[in-house]
Image (spheres, rainbow, N blue to C red):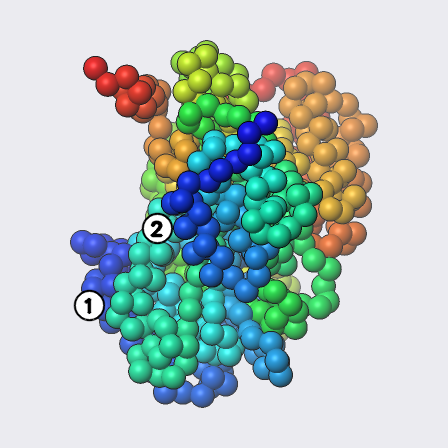
Amino acid sequence: MTAFAPSPEIQHAIDSVLQKYPTKMAACIPVLHLCQDAVGWCSPEVIEWVAKRLELPAAHVQGVVTFYTLFFQKPVGKHVIWVCQTLPCALRGAEGVLEHLQSKLKIKVGETSSDNLFTLKTAECLASCDSAPMIQIDKEYFEHLTNERIDEILGQFRAKENPS
Amino acid sequence: VIEPVAFLTKTFGAQNPSSLETYENHGGYQAIRKVFSMEPAKVIDEVKAANIRGRGGAGFPMGVKWSFMRPHPTLPAYLVVNADEGEPGTHKDRYLMEKAPHLLLEGCMIGCYAIGAHTCFIYVRDELHVAKARLNQAIDEAKAKGFLGNSPFGKSYALNIVVHSGAGAYICGEETSLLNSLEGRRGEPRIKPPFPAQVGAFGCPTTVNNVESIAAAVVAMQMGGAEFSKLSRLHALGDGGCRLYGVNGHVQKPLVIELPCGPTINELIELAGGVSGGRKVKAVIPGGSSCPVLLPSEIFSAPDEKSPLHAWHGKSVFDVPMGVDTMRAAGTMLGTCCLTVIAEGTSMVRVAANIARFYKHESCGQCTPCREGTGWLHRIYGKIEAGEGSLEELNMITEIASNMVGNTICAFAEGAAGPMIAFVRKFRSEFEARIQGEPLAKSLI
């Protein structure tokens, strides 16, 4: 187990986050976001480091990590695909989107593709009901989806990995 | 048909709608200048006169909520904006944040001044990265212009606005849960009292308002509270102004549109191009999945001739103006007034199972009736959907849901139970048929 050692940039970002709040605890979620962005998930080392940095019990930080859907408790692929499956998206084809992604990536929900590029997850309502069906990949929304559009999006992500 | 208006959305069509320049060219940051010349109590009176019913779903009058704030001898006060939009079928606040971030900021300034706060936190659900970036950019622009800081617009009233990110939890839209989350805790709702106006964020007096409510305050202060209220078809019911309506699901053109308060369900479906595939409408969820489903065959009942609702007595609920009180009288809720339209031929068994899954996933687990109840409802609806349910289990749904109501810390359980009861009551024959082996429609589309 190697201790988490955030870069100076992250340290700096954490310092400015802390200035925004009257308590150190309030920085817990923003700081976890910053660390997860760097490491890819909220590893035990990240939790321990954040607890020390914010002067909180590690159990508190662990409790926060396990409460929120967007903190990963296990490593994930390089990109995480969230498929909105809640009713307004379901009424406009979310089931087909999920099926198509599963067959294209040859994985089931919760799994990571063999090249470690994509983890597939389902999401509950992402507040984008008028552009359904939609997915979120990392921090970006992709809306009004069709199978062709999904293929195109996956292709773009793959092309970024292997520029020819 | 009701005509769209452009108050909240006035910059949406502009070239660079989110910029400070665009906003000022459209009369932005004039309301706050006016507000700074008034006594805070007068600002609250004006917002009361505007009859802004909370746009987050609860429909509580915003001016009244503001008036609950009392200066504390030692503690600061906070304004917290609820931008945790996540009620299934709700997709309106995102537009305001992305396209009119300065409108929200101006609303925050007005709100802070009215309730005696100097710091405002905007709690945005994490997924809305574009909204957060635009808000942060707008804050930077406003700071550079001297609109935020120690003496905004030359007034010695310090103002600071912070964008805070959530991390994925529907429950954080509940205001006390949101406050816990803002403080860096698990987003579990708090027991009330004390209410946030007494003990809110960081133990200080706090007002929590929805994004659109805060934005509406700008329009109300610009045109005057009473004038703003009169924009509404339901002004006489104390449900004032204009607001954003959404239409999603089985319609030709899902949309978000700004209208005077009080369009009918039928008008909204028409504005969205009608039901998709030339079908008829089977049912509508009026304002997010917590609102019990409505059928076009339901008749609005207000037999008391003295009641202000009597005007619509005997009409289809689809022809009644959508307002906080009218939808309550129709046995549902206005919620966030983003309609989910369900076309004929759609399996209500699958619709109900989808929503049951949502509540099971999002219950925070703090209170046993909700944690266990949403689990049971999810399992039973799932079994019926899979063709493995029994009539005995169907009969248990109402009992389980009823035992959740009133037995929990927050209103999540009511929001989960209400629609579950309504689906069984209004579509019982569909559930029975499925239990007896009728095949399900293949797709929900």
Label 1: chain?
Answer: B
Q: As rendered, which of B174 and A69 lies closer to the eye?
A: A69
Image marks 2 and 1: residues in contact by CB distance under 8 Å: no
Quickly name the residue at label 1: B25
Q: Residue at x 71, y 38 (%)?
A: B374
Query: Is any part of residue B134 visible from this angle?
Result: yes
Q: Which residue is drawn at 34% across and 21% down?
A: A154
**Vertical side of B256 occupied by A144: above or below:** above
- Quadrant, the C terminus of chain B: top left
> What SS does tag 2 mark?
helix
Q: What amino acid is at disc 1?
A: Asn
Quickly name the residue at label 2: B133
- Quadrant, the N terminus of chain B: bottom left
**Vertical side of A128 occupied by B66: above or below:** below
Asked if residue B31 lies left or right of residue B324, the reply is left
The answer to which of marks 2 and 1 sits earlier in the sequence is 1
Query: Is any part of residue A84 visible from this angle?
Result: no
Q: In which quarter of the image is residue B201?
A: bottom right
> What SS does tag 1 mark?
helix
- Rounded to the nearest angstrom, the CA distance separating label 2 from label 1 is 22 Å
Q: Rate crowding at label 2 as few (under 14), some (14 to 19) or many (20 or more) other CA atoms within 10 Å.
A: some
Place of residue B327 in the rendered image (x, y in percent of width and height, measured from the top left): 56, 57
Q: Residue at x 73, y 40 (%)?
A: B371
Q: Residue at x 31, y 20 (%)?
A: A161
Q: In which quarter of the image is residue B231?
A: bottom left
Q: What amino acid is at disc 2?
A: Ala
